Image: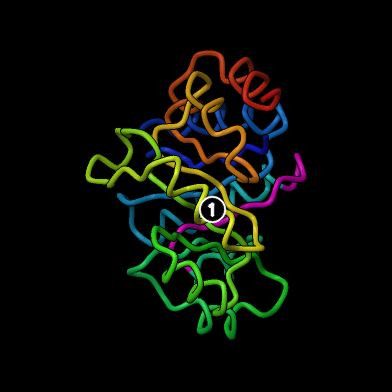
Amino acid sequence: MKIYLITSDMKDENIWFNKIERILKSGIDYIQYRDKLNSTAVKYYTAKKLKTLCNKYKTPLIINNSVDICLAVEADGVHLGKDDMPIDVARKILGPDKIIGASARTLQNLKRQEKSGADYFGIGALFKTNTKKDAEIISIEKLIELTSNTSIPVFAIGGINEYNAVKLKNTGIKGICTSSALMNSPNPEKIIEKIKSI
């Protein structure tokens, strides 16, 4: 099972980057830089530093929401939610080679985003999550319905950890997105090993 890390808020830069490097070293598949707290300037400098680290471990860097920061730091792509720039507009700006991810919860939304040119979907939340406390939970049956109705890769998201990831094994997903399960763990390497073996 592929692992897609979504970064947590940065409280201490050295600790944050050290943890991310340990996670990257363990062989995750994607990393998304998500920052709901800081200014564009701080996001730019953090993303630039993160891109250098991702290059070292040959891991694609996705920027949450910000097409401008993606371009500025030459990241590999963006993830766009329902309140962000439309996918087809982002594609015109970013060109054909950047990865554009989208969030989807309904079949109608999924089909529209796929037609607009999304490269992958983030679907959830599957379980309760402290990262996004207001996230609506979707059933595993709903996840299966959505994955079976698209030809592009689906990553499950929301409260996923090394204990409940196994419940998603035969749902048709490409992998899981996780944030606090890795960012808050004293031993993310062990968790990555366990999830990858599912």
Residue at the far left: name it. Answer: 134
Q: Residues within 10 Å of mark 1 (few under 14, many from 20)?
A: many
Where residue 109 sits, quadrant-wise, is bottom left
Q: Please, what secondary structure does the residue beneath circle 1 have?
A: helix
Where residue 19 sits, quadrant-wise, is top right
Q: Is residue 26 above or below residue 83?
A: above
**The N terminus lies in quadrant:** top right
Tell me, yes or no, whether the highlighted magenta stretch contains residue 190. Answer: no
Q: Position of residue 51 (x, y in %)?
A: 64, 51
Q: Is residue 115 above or below residue 182?
A: below
**15 sits to left or right of 49:** left
**The C terminus lies in quadrant:** top right
Residue located 33% across and 38% down the image: 131
Residue located 56% across and 72% down the image: 114
Q: Is residue 178 above or below residue 182?
A: below
Name the foreground residue: 4 vs 160.
160
Q: Give the residue pinned by disc 1.
A: 47
Q: Amino acid at mark 1?
A: Ala
Query: What scheme was used to colour the molecule?
Result: rainbow
Q: Position of residue 5 (x, y in %)?
A: 55, 39
Residue located 36% across and 34% down the image: 127
Q: Which portion, as a residue range, is magenta?
A: 55-66
**24 sits to left or right of 184:** right
Tell me, yes or no, whether the highlighted magenta stretch contains residue 60. Answer: yes
Q: How many marks?
A: 1
Q: Position of residue 47 (x, y in %)?
A: 54, 53
